[in-house]
């Protein structure tokens, strides 16, 4: 086992290797049989072209690849392989794949047939367009009937499909460079994946309005094809190389850093009781106590929260999943009585109908649910004098699609999760490209309403898109997993710092990026690079963030926000490298002190030019 890999990622498992394919000015990575990072003269054209097969519950059917053959020439490449996708029922979908590339084009085709009726929620191509440099810009969409729609890419995050019945998309890649992506073989439509903090717009096969799951009938072949054609004017420039040191600029704001929240979970109560000192270490001010009667939470859970609140002295927010199966007044009165019996004093109450934790995709019927105004009124009556929060216990997607009456609540809240669709390292760190739009869109909807986020962690605490989160006993990088090893490594520390930096413009009231204990928590367990019981790397970052709570902040602008991000108070600058390679940074001035954010807190030479190791975090005294 590589100790350095374990330290960085919390796991010794390495990501699949990729292969770079080049044809003239065009380049693209081949990984697991799919394409990512299609670039022309260094400019990103498409984030990914993938042929994916989902099972009936939207789980991913992994491809078994065989007979891979690759031919590369100076101005072109051709590869072919056979892919077999196996459904949980044992049916196989066999696909012959061909990918060809030239100096200005790529074509990806699939010819498929199943050996039995294959039940799937989706089988076919998915194309990801990037967000950076694209959001809000003009786009031309050609539809299946040949009509052309001249529009703009969504700037604020679109809750529903921005474009349907797509045959081709033409967009500007860079000055003088235009790309047209064609979709053949089925009906395609687009969703704004920033809803889930994916850094992309996704065009996918088969409209969601059609029934799913559906059957791919036995022995009935189908074919699909994606092609991207790039046109470049004479003299169209290449992208600036990324070899220069990264510059940093501090911009004063009128924003103060939020208070830190820490999540509590009934199943972690005993471990939480022995970890109370960590709350003081990180400077937490709020306990976000999860309470789900549908999961069996009752009086004992509330008594546990009361004990932790009494010993820590922190404010308590009860995060209540309201069953909504009996008259609301009765349910709320019973919860208030339980809270009183437990001796739990609430600072705030966050309520969400339990059913709203499940997603309602486009074209699906909304589940039966009381009017939110009635839910909030019942909560106010049962908990007089307690601040009331509303929004979604799940993710921004659900809040964007079911917008709450903000005039009836004291603050709005939601969480996010970076591994809904993809869980590779690069995709997780690219979620910050979308998170900034989550913040701006929420503010556009809810104005200056007090705003909270969290608990938000790399691992998924609850799955709105299926019956459960995915178990992850091997500690792999898998979407929708109930645990993620990177939370335990230096990757998790960089993720937390980058998250805090990205949401700073939202002027949040409370930010919660971990629980106190357990797999989402602050202290190490068995098998981690950090000794059991010691503080995980992200805890050291949270300690620096907690020290900034309520302080006036500077926004930090870097010349490579895809590589280094940060935030600053008047006295201190925090920076995170969100890449797997070292990054050289040039500070605005020579600092007084530079220290690694880690248990040892090793000091670096206080020079204006510093080097951040992979996923490294530093604290700089200005």
Image (cartoon, grey):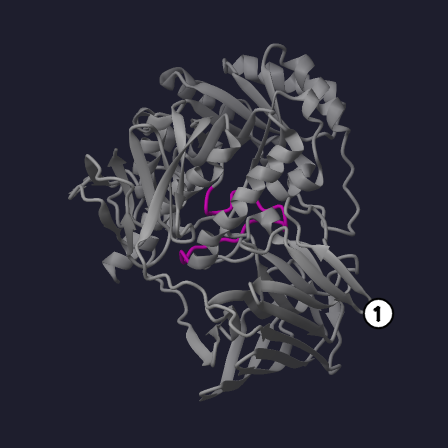
Q: How many marks?
A: 1
Q: Nearer the viewer, residue 243 or 161?
A: 243
Residue 294 seen from this side: no
Q: Which residue is mark 1?
A: 145
Q: Main secondary structure of the magenta part?
A: loop
Give the residues in magenta.
457-476
Q: Quadrant of residue 331?
A: top right
Q: Residue furthest front?
A: 235
Percent position of residue 569, x then y:
35, 29
Few, some or many C-alpha atoms within 10 Å of disc 1 (few <14, some 14-19, many ≥20)? few
| Residue 29 vertical placement versus 290 (above, below) | below
Percent position of residue 539, x then y:
33, 37
Can you say which quadrant of the picture contains the C terminus? top left
| Residue 538 vertical placement versus 580 (above, below) | above
Residue at the image point whose x is 79% and y is 57% from the top: 209
Percent position of residue 264, x then y:
46, 30
């Amino acid at each position: 086992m590589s100790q350095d890999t374990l330290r960085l990622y919390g796991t010794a498992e390495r990501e699949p290797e990729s292969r770079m394919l080049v044809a003239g000015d065009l380049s693209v990575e081949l990984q697991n049989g799919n394409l990512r990072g299609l670039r022309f003269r260094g400019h990103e054209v498409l984030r990914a072209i993938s042929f994916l097969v989902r099972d009936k519950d939207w789980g991913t059917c992994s491809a078994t690849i065989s007979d891979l053959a690759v031919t590369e020439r100076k101005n072109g490449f051709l590869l072919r392989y056979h892919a077999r996708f196996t459904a949980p029922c044992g049916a196989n979908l066999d696909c012959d794949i061909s990918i060809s590339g030239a100096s200005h084009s790529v074509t990806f085709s699939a010819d498929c047939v199943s050996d039995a009726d294959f039940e799937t929620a989706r089988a076919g191509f998915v194309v990801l367009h990037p967000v950076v440099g694209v959001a809000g810009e003009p786009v031309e969409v050609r539809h299946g009937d040949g009509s052309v729609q001249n529009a703009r890419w969504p700037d604020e995050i679109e809750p529903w499909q921005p474009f349907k019945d797509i045959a081709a998309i033409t967009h500007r890649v860079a000055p003088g460079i235009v790309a047209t992506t064609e979709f053949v073989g089925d009906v395609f439509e687009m969703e704004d994946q920033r809803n889930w903090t994916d850094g992309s717009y996704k065009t996918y096969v088969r409209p969601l309005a059609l029934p799913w799951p559906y059957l791919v009938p036995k022995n009935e072949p189908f074919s699909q094809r994606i092609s991207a054609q790039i046109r470049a004017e004479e003299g169209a420039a290449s992208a600036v190389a990324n070899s220069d040191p990264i510059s940093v600029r501090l911009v004063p704001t009128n924003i103060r850093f939020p208070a830190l929240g820490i999540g509590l979970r009934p199943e972690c109560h005993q471990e939480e009781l022995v970890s109370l000192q960590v709350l003081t270490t990180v400077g937490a001010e709020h306990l976000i106590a999860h309470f789900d009667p549908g999961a069996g939470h009752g009086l004992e859970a509330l008594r546990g929260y009361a004990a932790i609140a009494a010993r820590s002295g922190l404010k308590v927010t009860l995060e209540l999943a309201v069953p909504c199966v009996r008259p609301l007044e009765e349910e709320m009165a019973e919860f208030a009585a339980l809270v009183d019996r437990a001796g739990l004093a609430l600072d705030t109450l966050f309520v969400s109908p339990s059913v709203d934790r499940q997603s309602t995709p486009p074209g699906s019927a909304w589940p039966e649910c009381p009017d939110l105004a009635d839910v909030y009124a019942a909560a106010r009556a049962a908990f007089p004098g307690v601040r009331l929060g509303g929004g979604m216990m799940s993710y921004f997607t659900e809040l964007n699609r079911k917008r709450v009456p903000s005039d009836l609540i004291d603050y709005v809240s939601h969480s996010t999760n970076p591994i809904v669709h993809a869980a590779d390292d690069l995709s997780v760190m690219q979620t910050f490209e979308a998170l900034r739009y989550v913040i701006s869109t929420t503010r556009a909807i809810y104005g200056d309403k007090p705003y909270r986020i969290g608990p938000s962690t790399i691992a998924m605490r609850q799955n709105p898109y299926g019956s459960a989160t995915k178990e992850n006993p091997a500690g792999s990088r898998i979407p929708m997993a109930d645990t993620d090893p990177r939370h335990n490594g230096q990757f998790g520390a960089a993720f937390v710092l980058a998250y805090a930096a990205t949401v700073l413009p939202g002027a949040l009231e409370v930010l919660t990026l971990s629980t106190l204990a357990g797999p989402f928590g602050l202290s190490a367990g068995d098998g981690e690079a950090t000794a059991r019981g010691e503080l995980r790397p992200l805890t050291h970052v949270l300690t620096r963030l907690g020290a900034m709570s309520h302080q006036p902040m500077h926004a930090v602008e870097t010349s490579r926000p895809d590589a280094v991000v940060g935030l600053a108070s008047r006295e201190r600058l925090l920076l995170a490298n969100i890449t797997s390679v070292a990054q050289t940074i040039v500070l605005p001035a020579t600092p007084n002190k530079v220290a690694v954010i880690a248990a040892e807190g090793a000091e670096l030479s206080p020079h204006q030019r510093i080097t951040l190791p992979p996923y490294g975090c530093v604290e700089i005294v200005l």
